[in-house]
Image: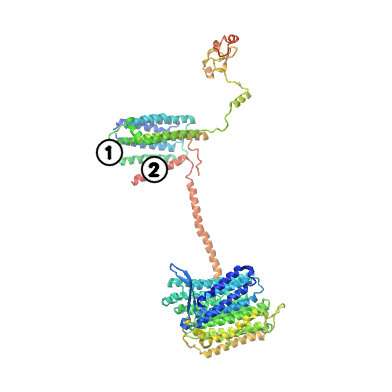
Amino acid sequence: MVSPFLFWFVAVITVIPSLALLFARKAVHVAMAVVLVMVGLAVAYVALEAPFLGVVQIVVYTGAVMMLFLFVLMLVGVDQRESLRETIAGQRWIALVLSIGVAALLISVVDRAGFGEPAVAKTGGPAEVAPYLFGNYVLVVETLGFLLITAAIGALVLTHVPRLFPRRTQREVQAARVAAGANPVNKTFPGVYATHNALDAPALDPEGNPIEESVSRVLKVRHQTTDGIEFKDENRSRRRELGAKEGDA
Amino acid sequence: MLSVSWLLIALPLVSFFGLMLAGRRADAWGHWAGVGVSGATALIGIIAFFEMVGRTASERSESVHLFTWFSGGELNLDAGLLLDPLSLTFVLLITVVGTLIHVYSVAYMEHDPRRRMFFAYLNLFIGAMLLLVTADSYLLLFVGWEGVGLASYLLIGFWNHKAEYATAANKAFVVNRVGDMGLILAMGLMFAHFGSLSFADVFSASAGASTAVLTAIGLALLLAAAGKSAQFPLQSWLGDAMAGPTPVSALIHAATMVTAGVYLIVRSGVIYDGAPDARLVVAIVGALTLVIGAIIGSAKDDIKKALAASTMSQIGYMMLAAGLGPIGYAFAIFHLVTHGFFKAGMFLGAGSVMHGMNDQVNMRRFGALRSAMVITWATFGFGWLAILGVPPFSGYWSKDKIIEAAFVGEGWQPWVFGLTALIGAGITAFYMSRLFFMTFHGKARWTDEQHPHESSLLMTVPMMILAAGSALLGAIMGVGNRFQNWLEPVTGAHGHEEPVLSVPVLTTLTLLLVAAGVALAYWMYLRKPVPIEPPPGSLAILAARDDLFQDSVNRAVFQVPGTHLTRTLVYADAAIVDGAVNKQATGVAWFGEASRRFQSGRVRSYALLMMLGFVVIAAILVVGG
Amino acid sequence: MSPINFVYLASVLFAIGAAAVLLRRNAIVAFMGVELMLNAANLTLVAFSRMHGVLEGQIMAFFVMVVAAAEVVVGLAIIIAVFRSRQTISLDEPTELKG
């Protein structure tokens, strides 16, 4: 038996957010509402002596499925505000009537079938569920594994973008770069010809002047760069005269 | 010989196919093959005849079983031949006269490149006609019936490069078809009521059938006979059938095919025994046609058409005799046989005249041919005397007997029929004499390029034989009622009843009328010059020249309404039947277009429809329980 | 309170999810409506499992969850693919099935 308070709590926490499905303008709001609904349902499962299922609900639905939804929303466009004006004539009213009709039908069917007292509860914890899953229904479990792999591959196949143009080789990139008159070589990394190669320390050219472009623009905008002059390697030219190779200490 | 009498039919049919398929290499001898086959059938016929004569009267019926034709189901019919006096009489007539005409045709068709096919068709005709008269069931008779119709069509339209000849062949076939409908109806009635189509079964079953059924069958058979024998109202084809070569007119449209109707009526005598009303109609039809033919014949200038009208009239005599019942059957057949000889002889004579006059047929262009074509004149003359009924020629024996029989009976019938026959004899005398005088006597009215000459032996010998028959056959058959006794097993015993006017009176009256007719013709066409252009005449003469408006009547009563009916039916078929089907198709297409609007392409509309469906079904399940 | 009340709750959630699918134009929001419907079914399963005192309902709900996860993966991949070609995820845009 479930306490009435628990039941009504679950009822409120599932029905009210699900109305956002109908009335919210932004899709992200809808997604968040649905997350709330899922959590509410998990509470319901636990209330119904199915703790394993409740946790699975959180992990799979809230954790995986709804995150998937949010990721796709991000890809597709989070900013879209959907106008709630109905374009197809009569759709709104017929849909409302039908939905209410469905609910009425289902409730009346259940109502008509008189149920007696609920039987003795059997808690559905992992230990109780496991014999079923890996006993009677092990074949189903394996098939579901199959299904999941297929779904994953299906998603890959569906979103695969076939290459329309051949890949630009490095040679072409370089040629275009030179033709445009840009710098043919990459930007220098921080710490070249210097004794310190932190990201905010600029590289030094052979005369010991810092190279501006070796530090990220973002750091510059945030004024988080350092002046790299103090890191100049003084002994470099002397060591060279002495015959030391590059790369030695 | 009687048991192999199927050869009578098989030989000519094989010859037909053979000559047809042999191709041009048979052109040199094809005609003689045809003559030979016809002669063979004559030989078989004669031997069979003598075989039958040798038997006693009660045994004069031979059934030859050929093969099982239909078996199983409701109709079981064997194909077989029935040889009895009636059929053998016809066999003799067909084969003997046929062979003579075959010989005649060798010379007549000498210059025609398709002579071989002509003989093939002639043989086809002989085979089919023999099948008709020897069949032992109505269905087999019908096969022969259709066969002679086909042969007639092929032969009338033999020179079908001339459009009007081909049309004449069509006309003959179509009018015959109307008659065939009667035969099919009769066979249907027989099958429905008697369950069989063989003569034996039908005749034995008709004793117990109702009068209504028998009358219906009788009238249907009369329709068939009228079609084949060119009796009223189906007589319009015979005049146009003269488009065929003259041997065809002689054989088919004088001696044999047109007599098939009389054969049918006489053979079905048992049926008419139970249907006196139908028999009366037969007599009326015969009497009517007798008069119609005579009137038309008096006004025709085309020698062949005049002879055709004469044939129509003489067959009217035969029908009248057959319609008088058992007293008349034998005389009908008697007249049929004698008519076959003298009319065929006269047609061959006309052909000989045409041959000598460059295929001219207008009698107003003949005249004084007696000296130019003596043998033709003599043989034609025999025929003329025979048809007049001058004793001792054959016509006297047969026609006078018919007139006597027509005067037998009670009430109005003997007077009407008898007087009709009597007056008809007078008119016959008139127009046949007119024909004879216009052709052979008087002044020559030939056109410049005509040099009439006598025909070759191949043509004149058959004519002579037929003339001998015209002279002698009547006496041979008539003396001592020999022919009647010969036919008795088939026609039934005839009572000897007295006509209402005594026999000597009748004979005298007949001869007087005949003399009057000859005299009138003599005065009009021998004493007075014959005008080359037909002179304007009274309404009656104009009507007679136009075949008593038979074509106009047919056109107005049958053809035009028929065309309208078919046009209406065609329109109804297109509009209603086709329209219904097409409207269905367009309706389906319209429905598709209307349903198409549900396919808006919008996902949410489809989702709505799915939801709607689900709710409806769930509601039904929930509420329905 | 009897677990049956949770079934009523599930019916209401199901109806709301169905309405969301029919009424919202954003494809992802509609998809979330589908997820809500699936969850409502799960709740029903667990509630009845509790009613009858057996664990089979919970096992089935577990399987439903797994399948729903796979479905979300593929469904969102489709939405991304459609977005890449059309630059919009409005459900009213694609009308190729019209007619």
Spot occupied by residue A106 in the image (x, y as percentages of width and height): 35, 40
Q: Secondary structure at mark 1?
A: loop
Label 2: which residue? B615
Packing grade of label 2 (10 A; few <14, some 14-19, many >=20) is some
What is the quadrant of residue B28 in the picture?
bottom right
Label 1: which residue? A116
Q: Chain of mark 2?
A: B
Spot occupied by residue A150 in the image (x, y as percentages of width and height): 45, 35
Spot occupied by residue B442 in the image (x, y as percentages of width and height): 68, 84
Q: Chain of mark 1?
A: A
* Label of residue B525 in the image: none
Residue sitting at x 53%, y 83%? B334
A214 or B539, nearer to the observer: A214
Q: What's the residue type where badge 1 is placed?
A: Gly
Packing grade of label 1 (10 A; few <14, some 14-19, many >=20) is few
What is the quadrant of residue B203 in the picture?
bottom left
Taking B23 as reference, is B89 above or below it? below
Number of on-image labels: 2
Q: Secondary structure at mark 2?
A: helix
Residue sitting at the far right: B448
C43 or B126, nearer to the observer: B126
